[in-house]
Image (cartoon, grey):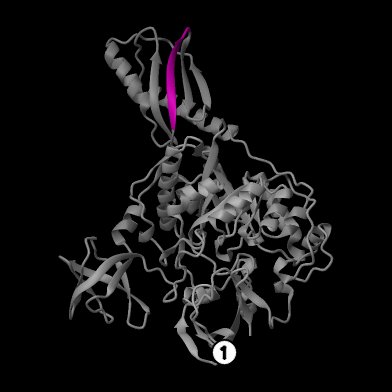
């Protein structure tokens, strides 16, 4: 029976972070192309991507490159040439948003449908599946039951975000940043207006909530739902964070590597999607690196708080409450060790998150430059753990187990090496045979030297000596032979790595007329939808001139629900329409209770 591969997919801001993610156990990484990568600040050179590909493929890990923005007409050929180049350097797949990519003449590199293609509704997902898209990255807003239903209907691989920052809007459907500043989220230029403070105003101009981050969400953490996601049909588990630093990526990757390994260990029908194991010199803990507080979002329907109204900043890990305060410091009731250089924070009486650095610790007493209103009972969080960050600076190592057999031949000796994937090489050495004067010592020395693997990607897990008697070898010779055979094995692994191919299929599906939310901004994507039956296609938001009364966000997150005002749960009423206000910017909220969605419209 072929086992199902479970893939841990980590973000790579750059080459360094990508290598660190692989060393910490990622089965695959995704990295931004030099341009068109949906994160303007996370582009990478083709040369660096090629280096990452070469490193990843040693472990049969994969590298996916994001080319997932919408594309204007004058950029189409540039994008096509970029994808051809990415295929040439060995990238395993391109993650795309714009349907123009499906109309391009391209080499058979696999195409993965970005969550930016709005993979929220079943019919949309089925269309992509019919077109031969190998993998579909599902919308974060889906529930376990919805994912199960999708899996029953499609054959494509399903990828799902399990950790990291959340966009409040359905992916690919956010136009707020472009409307306000001309910086389009669909072009990788999001200004993160959702993290700003807003006041909630009712129809009578009453302020229901004043100056809170009403669109800012907590960070996703689905570590408690991994088994459920596996059962639902998810095979790629994605960590968000192409703008996160290397320490964050190491910590979160190592944490989820442990979680998935436990699932694989207890379920023989599953296996890792890459080779080897990681030696982690720290105990991973998601709360100790950047987080805004965690949520399971909607994976279990609406059973969890999802917003972070008080602050969009990282609050870190809860330490405890302040038990006493003096003029120069305070004491926290905690068993956690606090050290100089730690960053701590708390919410003041107005709900504002304030932070400070620890200057000195004496026993349980903490000294800071200023107290900022801390009092007895204040809850303290640590948003920078100095000692843990130092631990994260240590190198993770990834190794592949290998067995070595040393054999005697008529005219010399041979070394046979086979790794855990069955990749094997043999090298013969023609040398004069010299009998050892001390047989036991000679055999022990030979075995000991062959067990060494130095700075290679291998761990020699077993050595067999098959000779008629003990022979003497200079240490230099044994070490040279071992290095040679392990180098040969590494090259054989790279050469035996096989990439998958993509072949576009014809779809019998049809689509109706499309509005601006289809994100059509070029002639090729127009052609794509015309071929599927669309007669009228409104230009994408980025080509619009008048934004009045346009929906700039569509969200499953609902402010009324978050504030306990959902009409299905309470008889409380508010005077609608409700508005969000930030300075001179005003948005009207429309609640589609039938589909459980909230629309944000420029007022």
Q: Main secondary structure of the magenta part?
A: strand
Query: What x and y, as percent, mark residue 217?
Result: 48, 69
Is residue 592 among what the camera can see?
Answer: yes
Q: Quadrant of residue 192?
A: bottom right
The residue at the far left in this view is 363
Using a 10 Å C-alpha cutoff, classify the residue at mark 1 as few (fewer than 14 neighbours), some (14 to 19) or many (20 or more): few
Q: Residue furthest front?
A: 571
The residue nearer to you, when weighing 585 against 366, is: 585
Per the image, is 404 magenta?
Answer: yes
Q: Quadrant of residue 183?
A: bottom right
Residue 590 in the magenta stretch? The answer is: no
Query: Please, what secondary structure does the residue beneath circle 1 have?
Result: loop
Residue position marked by numbered label 1 in the rendering: 203
Instruction: Find residue 65 and report its horizontal and vertical position in percent.
Output: 61, 52
Over which residues does the magenta segment extend? 401-410
Image position of 154 (left or right of 429):
right
Q: Is residue 31 visible?
A: no
Q: Quadrant of the N terminus?
A: top right
Query: Please, is residue 330 above or below residue 70 in the view?
Result: below
Seen at 46% across and 64% down, the residue is 303
On the image, the x and y values in percent for residue 298 come to 51, 62
Residue at coordinates 28% horizontally, 65% vertically from top-left? 319
Using residue 127 as the reference point, say whether residue 585 is left or right of it: left
């Amino acid at each position: 029976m072929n086992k199902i591969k479970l893939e841990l997919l980590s973000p790579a801001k750059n080459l360094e972070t990508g290598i660190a993610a692989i060393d910490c156990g990622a089965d695959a990484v995704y990295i931004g192309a030099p341009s068109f990568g949906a994160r303007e600040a996370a582009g990478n050179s083709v040369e660096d991507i090629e280096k990452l590909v070469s490193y990843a493929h040693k472990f049969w890990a994969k590298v996916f490159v994001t080319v997932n923005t919408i594309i204007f007409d004058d950029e189409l050929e540039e994008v096509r040439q970029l994808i051809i180049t990415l295929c040439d350097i060995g990238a395993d797949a391109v993650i795309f948003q714009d349907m123009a990519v499906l109309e391009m003449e391209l080499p058979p590199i696999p195409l993965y449908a970005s969550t930016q293609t709005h993979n929220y509704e079943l019919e949309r997902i089925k269309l992509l599946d019919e077109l031969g898209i190998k993998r579909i990255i599902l919308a974060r807003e889906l529930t376990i039951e919805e994912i199960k239903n999708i899996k029953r209907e499609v054959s494509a691989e399903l990828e799902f975000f399990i950790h990291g920052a959340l966009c409040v809007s359905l992916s690919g459907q956010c136009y707020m940043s472009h409307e306000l500043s001309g910086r389009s989220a669909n072009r990788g230029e999001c200004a993160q207006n959702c993290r700003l403070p807003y006041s909630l105003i009712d129809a009578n101009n009453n302020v229901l909530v004043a100056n809170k981050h009403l669109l800012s969400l907590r960070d996703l953490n689905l570590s408690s739902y991994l088994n459920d996601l596996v059962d639902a049909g998810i095979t790629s588990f994605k960590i968000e964070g192409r703008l996160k630093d290397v320490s964050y990526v190491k910590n979160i990757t190592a944490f989820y590597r442990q979680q998935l390994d436990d699932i694989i260990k207890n379920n023989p029908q599953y296996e890792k999607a890459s080779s080897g194991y990681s030696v982690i010199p720290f105990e991973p803990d998601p709360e100790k690196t950047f987080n805004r507080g965690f949520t399971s979002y909607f994976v279990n329907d609406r059973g969890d708080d999802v917003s972070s109204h008080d602050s969009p900043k990282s609050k870190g890990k809860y330490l405890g409450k302040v038990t006493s305060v003096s003029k120069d410091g305070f004491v926290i009731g905690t068993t956690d060790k606090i050290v100089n250089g730690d960053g701590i924070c708390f919410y003041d009486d107005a709900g504002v998150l304030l932070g400070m650095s620890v200057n000195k610790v004496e026993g349980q007493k903490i000294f800071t430059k200023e107290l900022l209103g801390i009092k007895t009972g204040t809850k303290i969080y640590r948003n920078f753990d100095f000692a843990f960050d130092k631990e994260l600076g240590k190198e993770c190592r990834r190794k592949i187990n290998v067995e070595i057999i040393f054999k005697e031949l008529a005219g010399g000796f041979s070394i046979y090496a086979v790794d855990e994937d069955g990749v094997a090489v043999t090298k013969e050495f023609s040398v004069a045979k010299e009998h050892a004067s001390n047989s036991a010592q000679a055999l022990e020395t030979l075995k000991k030297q062959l067990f060494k693997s130095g700075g290679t990607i291998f761990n020699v897990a077993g050595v067999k000596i098959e000779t008629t008697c003990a022979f003497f070898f200079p240490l230099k010779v044994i070490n040279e032979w071992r290095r040679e055979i392990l180098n040969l094995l590494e090259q054989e692994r790279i050469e035996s790595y096989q990439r998958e191919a993509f072949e576009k299929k014809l779809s019998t599906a049809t689509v109706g007329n499309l509005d601006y939310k289809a994100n059509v901004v070029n002639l090729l994507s127009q052609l794509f939808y015309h071929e599927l039956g669309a007669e009228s296609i409104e230009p994408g938001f980025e080509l619009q001139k008048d934004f009045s009364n346009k929906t700039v966000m569509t969200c499953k997150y609902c402010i009324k629900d978050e504030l306990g005002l959902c009409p299905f749960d309470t008889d409380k009423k508010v005077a609608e329409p409700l508005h969000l206000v930030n300075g001179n910017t005003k948005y009207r909220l429309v609640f589609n209770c039938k589909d459980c969605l909230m629309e944000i419209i420029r007022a």
